[in-house]
């Protein structure tokens, strides 16, 4: 299996697990897919974050397909060590993303609905960082850049990074503050946003 085809297979696995499997499990457990869509009106910061997130997904697939068919050239050849490292980081990131999603239980959502109240999850992976799903998704995306170092994968990672920052700072954290007030402030004061210890 060529390196770009391996990257594409890992991407399909990642999106199948993170969105397909988790959505199916949540639907079976709660009767809801958990999908709340893109927040904000077109042109708002929240909306831009959602669009960038979707763009990051599309660009990651384009990076793998483009390199596989020869439309995109790698910025450097990663060699066997780079392939093994990138594959290991990516697989670890996929597993960690799924485990972080599962640890949210019935509170798991994709997006935010203002009139909905979910429990504040502060245990498991959420005792280590406040946004472990996003942290693990970024680790997965970084692994894919190592495995598939072309300009589209780099742009995909950058789009995902900006999208996550906008989603957390302008959608999720304000919602959690409005919903949980001081309890969320106390939690945020002791647990890092994306990296343990960096509050």
Image (spheres, grey):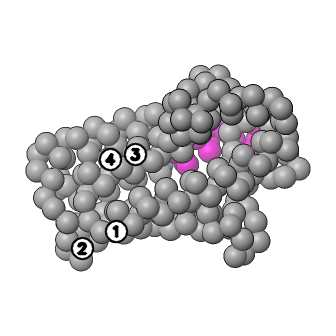
Residue at 19% from the left image edge and 47% from the top image edge:
83
For the residue carrying disc 4, how many other residues have a C-alpha within 10 Å: few (<14), some (14-19), or many (20+)? many
For the residue carrying disc 1, how many other residues have a C-alpha within 10 Å: few (<14), some (14-19), or many (20+)? many
Q: Are marks 3 and 1 in contact (CB under 8 Å)?
A: no
Is the residue 30 above or below the residue 35 in the image?
Answer: above
Q: Which mark is residue 77?
A: none
Q: Which residues are magenta?
A: 18-33
Q: Are marks 2 and 1 in contact (CB under 8 Å)?
A: yes
Is the residue 182 above or below the residue 47 in the image?
Answer: above
Could you tell me how many numbered marks the image carries? 4
Residue at 40% from the left image edge and 45% from the top image edge:
140
Q: Tell me if I can see residue 23 in this picture.
A: yes
Mark 1, secondary structure of its residue: helix
Q: Position of residue 40 (x, y in %)?
A: 76, 66
Circle 1 sits on which residue?
152
Mark 3, secondary structure of its residue: helix
Q: Are marks 4 and 3 in contact (CB under 8 Å)?
A: yes
Q: Which mark is residue 143?
A: 4
The quarter of the image holding the C terminus is: top right
Q: Rounded to the nearest whole Å, what is the CA distance between mark 2 and mark 1?
A: 8 Å
Q: Sequence order check: which comes first, mark 2 or mark 3?
A: 2
Circle 2 sits on which residue?
72
Q: Which mark is residue 140?
A: 3
Residue at 55% from the left image edge and 66% from the top image edge:
52
Is the residue 151 above or below the residue 116 in the image?
Answer: below
Q: Position of residue 168 (x, y in %)?
A: 64, 50
User: Within the magenta stretch, is there residue 31?
Assistant: yes
Q: Rounded to the nearest whole Å, what is the CA distance between mark 2 and mark 3?
A: 21 Å
In front of the other: 117 or 10: 117
Q: Sequence order check: which comes first, mark 3 or mark 1?
A: 3
């Amino acid at each position: 299996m060529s390196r770009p085809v391996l990257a594409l297979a890992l991407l399909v696995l990642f999106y199948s697990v993170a969105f397909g499997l988790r959505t199916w499990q949540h639907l079976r457990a709660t009767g809801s897919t958990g999908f709340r869509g893109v927040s904000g009106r077109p042109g708002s910061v929240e909306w831009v974050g959602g669009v960038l997130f979707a763009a990051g997904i599309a660009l990651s697939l384009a990076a793998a397909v483009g390199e596989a068919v020869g439309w995109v050239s790698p910025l450097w050849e990663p060699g066997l060590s780079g392939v093994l490292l990138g594959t290991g980081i990516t697989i670890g990131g996929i597993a960690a993303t799924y485990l972080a999603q599962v640890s949210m239980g019935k509170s798991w959502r994709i997006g935010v609905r203002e009139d909905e109240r979910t429990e504040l999850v502060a245990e498991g992976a959420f005792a280590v960082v406040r946004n472990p799903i996003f942290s693990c998704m970024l680790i997965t995306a970084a692994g894919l850049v190592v495995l598939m170092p072309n300009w589209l994968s780099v742009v995909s990672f950058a789009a995902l990074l900006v999208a996550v920052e906008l989603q957390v700072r302008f959608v999720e954290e304000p919602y959690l503050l409005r919903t949980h007030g001081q309890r969320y402030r106390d939690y945020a004061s002791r647990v890092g946003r994306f990296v343990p210890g960096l509050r």
